[in-house]
């Protein structure tokens, strides 16, 4: 009897499996680019709810359909696979300064190092979209060859204040520079058949309390600045994905705002990819006392919740069943995710090698790092004179440089070239006595610092600078031809920089003063190299050394690229993508930016006290459109270094610009001639002053830019730039429209916002372009104006 039961059960199971197989092979459509609607129709509600929620953290036990960690270890997340329909996983991995995956794996002797390219701020300092596109191609190739599908980059929020902890991942205080550099990066990445995910949409301009902070911003500042850079990037490059930010805007989290994610992003700008949350965004009911918002995410057009947990899928499924969520929204979300999946290399069965050409990419990072390096000061110290052979290297950063910032933007690269190695590679001698002092100091200081408890994403303090003794300095001056002092800074995800980090420490000031004085006494020069991720105070000390070079955190080849500039193999051609104020408080947003010492990365459920705190629960963007040079130039404030500034080893002359009306655009051209002694590249920055109109307008705004190729002495190049007339508009809140006032527009070609080389004027007819009246502030803001 027992035996019979066993056989009957086996037969029933067999028939069931057969039916399932028939169902899946005959009835279930297999996903391809042309049958997405059919697949959406065939999917069950449960399957749809799973697809819009990622498969969990890498090793998570709450993963919906198994762990993806085995695919690409160290990737940040993925979408679920549903084999029944041939729906493959899409692996999503950080960015943006290169692919972030684990460099080694258990029981595997291979390595999976990636190239650490320059940070975003250094890339934008190149003002060279072709070069950034080349960097994007190399990054995209590593994404492809390591088996990932989408890189979580670029980061494109504006630099609102110098202290934002993630400014290093972002490009600029200006939307035109930021948007065009982001577009170049995305076009480069996506040329490799993998996707880019531009982030964090939008207003992630501070890290303090980033999960719950509500940005209170005027519609005009939102449209003209914080959204504009995303608009430019999205229209010029169609990224596969956009990542919504953690923070809220005007009362509602960005991932829940249909007006932001659908009306503006899709209806107005024509974005056709997916929107995903930032990691755990859209699920943390942090500031709303437990109210769940996953449904709002779906309705808003935030298609994917990452990294995903089973409860989110369950909530969405239940919401459809109970009628709280109309299935039409879920169907749209699913459809868009499938449209992305069919484009992925994994779906196409790409046989990745795990062996990208790291050598070729090292050369690309070296070149782009050199081109993003800015010469801030030079009193004849650079390039090194022929008699410079022996170098006294000071500063921790000379020996232990920083390739990029911390957190998810950090890349696991196999090496970082120090300034010592870079100089030695160029046949310079580095003082060994100083080197030995630093080597043992850095080791003991770092061992001590490592004992500080910290999370993986937190930046640890850097070793305090040491000051050479008088006798050490005296012997260094005798045996060396020049002194190079490298100062460094490190910041990253989860917290903002402090005023102390902006200012130089006493030790740093002493180091610069003491070394410079000693070398000057012997008729020798000193140079400061800034291995930093964001703006620092410079006005009080910039006249002390003989030159200041700003390579930023320019990736793993920093030592080589710095040496390429120091020794004159290349002339510096980078320009500042942001203003350097004299004092931090000169920046108008400093009034509304978290003060030092407050470290609130999230606030626990119900902690209303945080919600009510200025710059924690909410931040008022009272400076309105007066961010960066828009403020400093309009209000005629002195700065330490203006936006767009940077020196060269050669000099250029500029022809009178020519400006003509061409259909819907204004075409601006100028001829640049290298009239100096060295080869070099130059950037033309086009600032436009609009006629008076209804709006309070900034003194000038960057509307276009272009860079020459390398010009030999005597050589010229004509740069021609087109500016759409609609891009001359200001946003009028009353009319909810972009308005181009009729009248005379002045086109100013500058080599910084404060150094204009030529001016041309043209009359432009008025025009009005209607926009949706969305993102309205819910409290009255006291906005700065010139009137
Ligand atoms: C960061 C994102 C990142 C994600 C995945 C988040 O904490 O804000 O920029 O892409 O983690 O690592």
Image (tube, grey):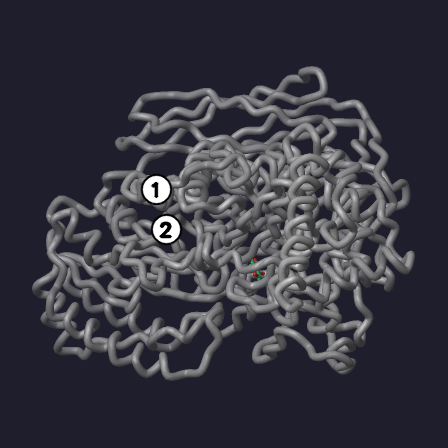
> Is 165 rendered above or below residue 663?
below
Q: Which residue is mark 1?
A: 356
Residue 467 visible in the picture: yes
What is the crowding at mark 2: few (fewer than 14 residues within 10 Å), some, or many (at least 20)?
many
Q: Name the residue: 72% across, 58% down.
A: 623
Could you tell me residue 459's position as x and y percent? 45, 71
User: Which mark is on residue 651?
Assistant: none
Judged left or right of residue 101, residue 333 is right
Could you tell me residue 279's position as x and y percent? 61, 61
Comes first in the chain, label 1 or label 2? 2
Q: Name the residue: 21% across, 76% down.
A: 468
Decide: marks 1, 2 in contact (CB < 8 A)? yes
Q: Name the residue: 75% across, 39% down.
A: 266
Check the image and name the residue furthest to the front. 1
Q: Report how far apart the C-alphas of labels 1 and 2 lie in the structure.
A: 9 Å
Q: Which residue is mark 2?
A: 114
């Amino acid at each position: 009897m027992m035996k019979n039961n066993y056989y009957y059960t086996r037969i029933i199971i067999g028939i069931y499996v057969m039916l399932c197989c028939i169902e899946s092979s005959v009835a279930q459509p297999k996903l391809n680019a042309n049958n997405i609607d059919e697949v959406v129709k065939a999917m069950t509600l449960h399957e749809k709810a799973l697809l819009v929620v990622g498969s969990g953290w890498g090793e998570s036990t709450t993963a919906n359909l198994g762990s993806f960690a085995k695919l690409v270890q160290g990737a940040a997340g993925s979408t679920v696979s549903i084999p029944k329909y041939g729906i493959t996983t899409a692996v999503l991995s950080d960015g943006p300064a290169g692919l972030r995956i684990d460099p080694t794996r258990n029981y595997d002797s291979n390595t999976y190092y990636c190239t650490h390219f320059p940070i975003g701020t250094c890339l934008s300092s190149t003002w060279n979209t072709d070069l950034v596109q080349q960097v994007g191609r190399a990054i995209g190739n590593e994404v492809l060859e390591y088996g990932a599908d989408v890189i979580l980059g670029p980061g494109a929020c504006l630099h609102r204040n110098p202290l934002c902890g993630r400014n290093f991942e972002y490009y600029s205080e200006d939307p035109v520079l930021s948007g065009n550099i982001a577009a170049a990066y995305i076009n480069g990445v996506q040329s490799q058949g993998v996707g880019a995910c531009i982030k964090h949409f939008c207003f992630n301009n501070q890290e303090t309390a980033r999960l719950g902070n509500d940005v209170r911003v005027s519609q005009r500042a939102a449209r003209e600045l914080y959204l504009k850079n995303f608009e430019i990037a999205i229209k010029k490059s169609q990224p596969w994905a956009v990542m919504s930010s953690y923070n809220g805007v005007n009362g509602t989290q960005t991932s829940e705002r249909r007006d932001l994610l659908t009306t503006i992003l899709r209806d107005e700008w024509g974005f056709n990819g997916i929107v995903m949350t930032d990691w755990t965004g859209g699920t943390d009911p942090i500031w709303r006392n437990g109210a769940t918002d996953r449904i709002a995410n779906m309705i808003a057009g935030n298609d994917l919740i990452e990294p995903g947990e089973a409860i989110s899928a369950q909530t969405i499924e239940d919401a459809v069943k109970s009628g709280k969520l109309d299935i039409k929204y879920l169907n749209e979300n699913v459809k868009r995710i499938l449209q992305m999946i069919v484009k992925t290399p994994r779906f196409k069965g790409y046989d990745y090698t795990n062996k990208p050409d790291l050598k070729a990419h090292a050369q690309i990072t070296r070149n782009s790092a050199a081109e993003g390096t800015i010469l801030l000061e030079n009193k004849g110290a650079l390039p090194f004179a022929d008699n410079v052979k022996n170098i006294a290297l000071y500063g921790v950063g000379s020996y232990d440089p920083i390739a990029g910032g911390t957190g998810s933007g950090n890349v696991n690269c196999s090496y970082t070239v120090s300034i010592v190695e870079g100089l030695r590679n160029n046949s310079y001698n580095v003082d060994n006595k100083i080197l030995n002092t630093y080597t043992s100091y850095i080791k003991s200081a770092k061992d001590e610092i490592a004992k500080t408890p910290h999370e993986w994403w937190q930046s640890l303090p850097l070793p305090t600078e040491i000051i050479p003794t008088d006798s050490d300095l005296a012997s260094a001056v005798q045996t060396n031809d020049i002194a190079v002092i490298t100062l460094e800074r490190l910041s990253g995800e989860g917290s903002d920089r402090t005023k102390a980090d902006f200012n130089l420490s006493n030790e740093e000031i002493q180091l610069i003063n003491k070394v410079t004085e000693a070398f000057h006494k012997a008729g020798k020069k000193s140079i400061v190299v800034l291995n930093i991720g964001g703006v620092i105070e410079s006005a009080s000390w910039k006249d002390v050394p003989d030159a200041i070079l700003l390579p930023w955190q320019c990736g793993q080849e920093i030592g080589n690229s710095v040496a390429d500039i120091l020794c004159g193999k290349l002339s510096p051609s980078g320009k500042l993508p942001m203003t350097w104020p004299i004092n931090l408080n000169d920046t108008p947003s400093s009034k509304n930016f978290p003060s030092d010492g407050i470290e609130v990365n999230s606030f626990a459920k119900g902690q209303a006290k945080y919600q009510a705190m200025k710059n924690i629960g909410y931040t008022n963007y009272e400076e309105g459109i007066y961010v960066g040079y828009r403020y400093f130039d309009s209000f005629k404030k002195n700065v330490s270094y203006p936006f767009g500034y940077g020196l060269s080893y050669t000099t250029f002359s500029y022809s009178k610009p020519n400006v003509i009306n061409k259909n819907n655009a204004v075409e601006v051209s100028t001829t640049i001639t290298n009239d100096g002694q060295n080869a070099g590249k130059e950037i033309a920055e086009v600032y436009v002053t609009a006629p008076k109109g209804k709006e309070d307008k900034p003194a000038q705004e960057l509307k276009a830019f272009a860079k020459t190729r390398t010009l030999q002495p005597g050589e010229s190049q004509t740069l021609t730039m087109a500016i759409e007339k609609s891009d001359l508009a200001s946003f009028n809140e009353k009319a909810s429209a972009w308005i181009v006032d009729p009248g005379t527009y002045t086109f100013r070609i500058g080599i910084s916002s404060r150094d204009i080389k030529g001016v041309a004027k043209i009359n432009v007819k008025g025009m009005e372009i209607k926009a949706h009246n969305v993102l309205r502030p819910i409290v009255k803001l006291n906005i700065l104006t010139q009137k």
